[in-house]
Structures are given as C-alpha cells and as structure tokens.
Image (spheres, rainbow, N blue to C red):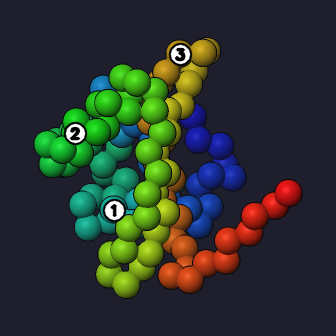
Amino acid sequence: MMGAWYKELKVAITVIDKEGKIVEMNDKACQVFEKYGGSQLIGQNVFSCHSESSRQKIARLIANQETNCYTIEKDGVKKLIYQTPWYQNGQIGGLVELSLEIPFEMPHFVRT
C-alpha cells in the first residue's frame, strides 16, 4: 500500500482499515509510537488503545466518511493532526492520520 516516498517522509502517517486495524505506518509514525510498540502496532486495533470518546469519534469518522483536523501540544511539540478517509475502488477503506510537527507561531496567508 505505502509507496517508497512515504517511508522516510518527516510526517507521521498511520493507516487503519474500516475495523480499526492498523495496516500501515511509515518510519516517522513508528518513531512517534515507539514507546507503544512502533512497527509492532501494525496489525493491532486502534480501538483497544483509545478512550471511549476517541473510539466513538473514530467510528463516526469511518461511518460518515468525515475528516477531523486539530492541533495538539505534547512534550513541548505542537502538531497538526489530520484524519481523513481513504478509498479503494471508490469504497471507503478506513482512515489515514497525518501528524505534522508545526511551529508555535506560524504565518497565515490569505490568497486572492
């Protein structure tokens, strides 16, 4: 599923199927989740390691084919989290999560 250019991208990419099973992680995602098992998480289900409210949100995103986007700060690092459906042959396959480290102060441009 994952092409070679994703592997070393400086963005954490985690892909789950419709049942919540982790089917792919790039190197950055494995590094980010190293203390939880890193690449050993592939094949595991995200529903087993999230709170009830998070499980409900993930299930809703999949069921309604919605996108969820927010920022977080953890251990002095600010990140943009972008969760969105992925598709195969026009059918939803699950969700992909992109986690990007971003500066605390970031320029914003309005283009016309």
| Helix, strand or loop for disc 3 | strand
Q: Of circles 2 and 1, which is in front?
A: 2
Q: 52 above or below 111?
A: above
**Is residue 44 among what the camera can see?**
no
Residue 106 location in percent, x, y? 61, 78
Residue 54 location in percent, x, y? 23, 45
Q: 77 above or below 82?
A: below
* Tag shown at residue 91: 3
The residue under label 2 is 55
Question: How far apart are the alpha carbons under marks 1 and 3?
Answer: 28 Å
Question: The C terminus appears in which quarter of the rendering?
Answer: bottom right
Q: Left or right? Give the position of 95 relative to 63.
A: right
Amino acid type, callout 3: Gln
Q: Left or right? Give the position of 77 relative to 88.
A: left
Residue closest to the eye, 66 or 95? 66
Amino acid type, callout 1: Phe
Residue closest to the eye, 2 or 96? 96
Q: Left or right? Give the position of 30 relative to 27.
A: left
The residue under label 1 is 33
